[in-house]
Image (cartoon, rainbow, N blue to C red):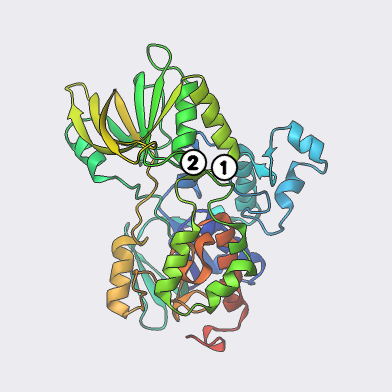
Amino acid sequence: MSAVPETPLDWVIIGGGPVGVQLAVRLIAEGRVSPERLRIIDPHPAFLQRWNACTASTGMAFLRSPAVHHLGLAPFELLQLAGRRKRDRRGQGLFAPPYNRPSVAFFARHCRSVVEAHGLAELHVQDRVQHIDLGGDHATLQLAAGGTVSTDRVVLALGNSDHPHWPAEASALRDGGGAVCHVFGPDAPIDPDPLPADVAILGGGISAAQLAVRLARQPGPSGKRRVTVLARHEPREHQFDSDPGWIGPKHMRGFAETRSLVRRRALVRSARHRGSMPPDVRRALRGAMDHGDVVWRTCKLLGGKVHGDGAMVLDLEEGRVEDGRVEGGQVAVGALVLATGFSPQRPGGVLVDRLIAEHDLPLAPCGYPVVDTHLRWHPRLFVAGPLAELELGPTARNLIGGRRAAARIVPVAEASCCAELAFL
């Protein structure tokens, strides 16, 4: 953990998730940025804390991403860490087919090794940035705990992991005393033990499916737990959350040639396989459903009635696949767990809102940043992660998106100064 530096820095990264850590590694190793001239500001005690909590909460066993997508430098170092022979790697349960997808535990081990190898823990300022002033000779960051940090360049490596999405109907049930929580809530990872025997999960994607299997496998207080998944569609199967062609020129060439930002937003939206799950998760879900441990109901949550102990009778609008009609339905549950992902709003909240207002930063009609090819939003301000998706496309939020963001930003660090690269 680092103290607040008194002298101006070269780079400050706001956000210690996978994207922020990847960028720090690349800036140090490839951008020739001296570690003492770089800091990562993140409010959690350790990097990737929210990432680790969220994967643990759902019960994720293996990542959806292949082994070559990680936080290190060399593409195959995750495989090399596991051993040379494929048979040995499989025998250890470190990877799952296809694409050698790493186990969550092994991926976390590798992340820790990357942080340690590059001394990133010593660059961590545990705090929140409340305000950024881009005027003057340096950008000045005001910290929540007091004090300021001055730097030549700032990178917003922000996500929405601290803002789980709460549908209005679920919020109303919670406000009425219902036992409602979110799988990605601030207290994640969620503990199955206190949950009652009858649990409903709202959501139809990978997180809902993984959580359903996790809860079904762990008995409730009085024995076998009954899990009901409430989803607006039948289970959808996709290996990845977007076509792999979005990583390279197959799709990105046309995306880059599209000048309309409205059209780019539409392409990003249509490219994502929202509410989907990979085949292995689908198989585990099907097994739990075949054993009667999980019931999948294709429906819309309308609301419900809350009893004094927090139990609820949920009102549903259920689809009739046979004839296209809908009918009313109900389900009695002791608790409702949301697996509805994260807020769709632009990341950064008030911090980014104030930046836009005070520095007249350019925005697309969807409210996201308009940046140059180096992901610069202002001569001193860069973006990565979701904020960069109008330039990087639908993979901007993923592990590979972090690597692609670093590939755009690192050349700026390699140059002798910002002015040597034209700002659009």
Say if 369 sits above or below 422 in the image.
above
Q: Label 2 vs label 1: CA separation?
A: 7 Å
Q: Which SS class for mark 1? A: loop
Q: Residue at image x 50%, y 50%?
A: 47
Q: Is residue 382 above or below residue 284?
A: below
Q: Amino acid at mark 2?
A: Ile
Q: Position of residue 392 (x, y in %)?
A: 52, 68
271 is higher (above) or lower (below) than 181: below
269 on left or right of 301:
right
Q: In the displayed structure, would residue 295 be above or below residue 80?
A: above
Residue situated furthest top in the rendering:
222
Q: Is residue 320 left or right of residue 22?
A: left
Looking at the picture, which amino acid does disc 1 mark? Pro
Instruction: Please tell me which of labels 2 and 1 falls first in the chain.
Output: 2
Callout 2–callout 1 Cβ contact below 8 Å: yes
Q: Is 170 situated left or right of 209 in this image?
A: left
The disc placed on residue 278 is 1
> Of helix, strand and loop, which one carries label 2?
helix
Residue 139 visible somewhere in the drawing? yes
Callout 1: 10 Å neighbours few (<14), some, many (20+)?
some
- Residue 152 is situated, as x and y percent measured from the top left of the image, at 47, 77
Residue 262 on image: x %, y %: 39, 73
Residue position marked by numbered label 2 in the rendering: 206
Number of numbered tags placed on the structure image: 2
Residue 342 image offset from top left, x and y in percent: 38, 49
Report the residue at 74% width, 45% height from top. Answer: 81
